[in-house]
Structures are given as structure tokens and as C-alpha cells.
Image (cartoon, rainbow, N blue to C red):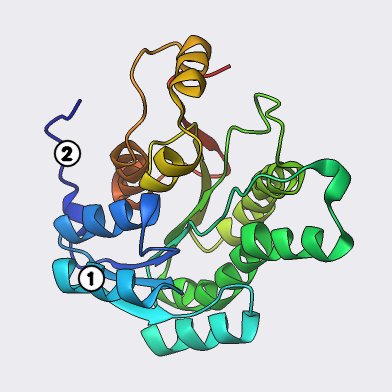
Amino acid sequence: MMSDFAIYPSLKNKRILITGGASGIGAEMVEAFCAQGADVAFIDRDEASSKSLSARTGARFALCDLCHVDALLNAIKDLGTFDVLINNAASDNRHDWREVTPEYWDERMSVNLRHMFFAIQAVAPGMIEAGGGSIVNIGSNSWWEAGGGFPAYATAKSAVHGLTRTMARDLGTHRIRVNTIVPGWIMTERQKQLWATPEALDAHRDRQCLPDLIDPVYVARMALFLSSDDAAMCTASNYMVEAGSI
């Protein structure tokens, strides 16, 4: 199911940074912002996918493992200053709660949460100097619907909402908006390959209000809106893209 989508004039030439931009939802957002005429950069550790996406869209990129904060900060510095930050990078690897070690727990927090704060810390001074900006953190409805099988991931994603709200307060006086997009089960290639069995999809449809599976493009469209001037009075809030999943 596809539609004719909106164009946001305020996004033209806006400087956009997307973490985890080389594949999945991130790549969909890179393409969507490029189609708006924005100046797009992304960070990822997948060199082949990054080069392919850059060649296709014209977006700039830096290679970086976001778990290494110093490397993240250097990558952002090299890419420049930004009007919009999309904190997208994450990994929802399944894990049994009985087998989680302290080291694995810390690694999951690094992959799914810690880099978001430090990316905000790095881009916010440039936004303050520019007179405002938009930060969009990608959460998950996995903890809203009490999903099991990945306790470290669900915990990290629940913390994204706290990060959003506290940073919206701290940065709001500078006209920097901070919001969370809450995706449901988005049908990226990774999800299709690893977990989207016919039985799992049937069960998931039963939990959604809408019958259609969710394409990554709809998360990208919400990111466009929240980054645009149309959302100038939207901050500290959750924006659900989960087809009414319970």
C-alpha cells in the first residue's frame, strides 16, 4: 500500500543527520529526506551499504561504530552542524533473560540508548547557535505492549522516552524540539529474514487495529513531519506508528 506523500518546503536545504542510516528504517529516512531537497548525512558501520545508499541518494556518510562514543563524536564533527538529528540506530536482537550477562546488558545499552544522548550533546550547540532545531529519537512499542524475548532491548527503548522528555525541557528554551517516534513491527528486510514467519505475522495482525503490515516508509514520513516547521509546536511527545497495536 503506497500513497502520494506530502512535500515540506521547510525541509529544503535543512541539514539532517541520521544514525544507523545505511539500511532498514534508517535508509528509508535517508531517501525520504533527500527527496525533500534536504542536505542529508548519515552514520553507520556498514561500509558497503553506506556506499551504495550514498551513490543512490547523494547523501554524505561517515563510518562509525556508535558504541564507541569518541568515534561518534569525531564522525559528527567531521560531518558538520545540523538542523535535525534522527537518533535511529538500534538492534533488537532476541535474548533469553536467563542468559544475560552484565557485559551483554551493557553492550545492549550502548547499542540502543547511550549513543542517543551523546549525539544530542554533540549537535545541540550548533542548533542553539542556529536558533533552534529538531531531534527525533526512535523508540519502540515493544515495551508498551509487554513484548518478551529481549529484556535489555525493551528496557533501553523504554528509557528513550525519558531521554526525550528531559532533553525537551532542557533544550526547549533554545527552540529545539525533541520527540519520540514509536514504531510497531516494521517490515524491514531484517525483520522479514529473521522473525516474520507466517504464524508470527498472523498473530501480529490480530493485535493491530489496522490489517496492513507496516512499511518502513511510514516511519520516515513521521520523521519528516516532526523535522519540518509544520511541527513547530510539537515537543516532548510520542508519535505512534504502530497501526493501533496492543
Horizontally, is 148 left or right of 236 in the view? right
Residue drawn at 15 percent across, 45 percent down: 7
Which one is in front in this view, the residue at disc 2 or the one at disc 1? 1
* Residue 103: percent from left, percent from top: 83, 66
Which of the 4 image quarters holds residue 5? Answer: top left
* Residue 146: percent from left, percent from top: 71, 26
Residue drawn at 29 percent across, 41 percent down: 217
Q: Is residue 80 visible?
A: no
Task: Tell me the quadrant of the picture where the C terminus can be found.
Answer: top right
Tell me: residue 206, above or below residue 226. above
Which of the 4 image quarters holds residue 60? Answer: bottom left
Q: What is the secondary structure assignment of the residue under circle 1?
A: helix
Please name the amino acid that badge 1 sits on: Ser
Q: Is residue 218 visible?
A: yes
Tell me: residue 201, above or below residue 24. above
Q: Nearer the viewer, residue 112 or 11?
A: 112
Residue at label 2? 6
Please name the amino acid that badge 2 sits on: Ala
* Residue 14: percent from left, percent from top: 26, 66
Residue drawn at 37 percent across, 40 percent down: 219
Residue at label 1? 52
Task: Give how far apart the Cα atoms at labels 2 and 1 are.
Answer: 26 Å
